[in-house]
Image: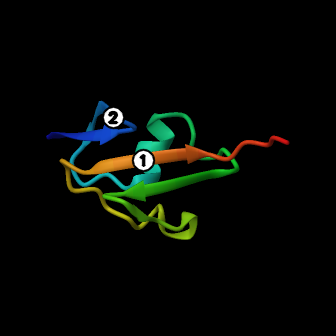
Amino acid sequence: MIMTLTVNNQSVEIADSASLRTLLTQLAIANQKGIAVAVNNAIVPRATWEQFVLSGNEKITILQATQGG
């Protein structure tokens, strides 16, 4: 089965019961440094991405740290 999530205001399909890491791998950003992920407005620590199971209809926000001055 497939579930639909909202990632940065865009619909993304992924297999049911996929982990957050699986989603980030599908999006080709799992190994990027300087990103933070929130699920339903709650930050999910990087150390728990593999164990964090997505359930569908969730709102995921991915932020990329940038340098500036």
- Mark 1 — residue? 61
Query: Which quadrant does the N terminus fall into?
Result: top left
Name above or below for residue 69 compared with residue 55: above
Q: Which circle marks residue 47 in the picture?
A: none
Task: Identify which amino acid the numbered label 1 is placed on.
Answer: Thr
Name above or below for residue 12 compared with residue 33: above
For image coordinates 55% across by 46% down, the residue present is 63
- What color scheme is it? rainbow
Q: Give left or right: position of 69 versus 32.
A: right
For image coordinates 24% across by 51% down, the residue present is 58
Residue 3 horizontal/vertical position (percent): 18, 41
- Mark 2 — residue? 9
Task: Identify which amino acid the numbered label 2 is placed on.
Answer: Asn
> Could you say which quadrant of the image residue 52 lies in?
bottom left
Q: How many marks?
A: 2
Secondary element at image label 2? loop
Q: Give left or right: position of 10 versus 44.
A: left
Gap between marks 1 and 2, in whole Å?
A: 8 Å
Secondary element at image label 1? strand
Residue projecting furthest to the front = 69
Q: Give left or right: position of 7 versus 45.
A: left
Residue projecting furthest to the left = 1
- Answer with mark 1 or mark 2, whichever residue precedes in sequence: 2
For image coordinates 43% across by 57% down, the residue present is 38
Residue 28 horizontal/vertical position (percent): 54, 34
Count neighbours of disc 2 (C-alpha within 10 A) and say few if under 14, some if 14 to 19, many if 20 or more: few
Residue 66 horizontal/vertical position (percent): 72, 42
Query: Which quadrant does the C terminus fall into?
Result: top right
Count neighbours of disc 1 (C-alpha within 10 A) and say few if under 14, some if 14 to 19, many if 20 or more: some
> Could you say which quadrant of the image residue 17 lies in?
bottom left
For image coordinates 49% across by 69% down, the residue present is 48
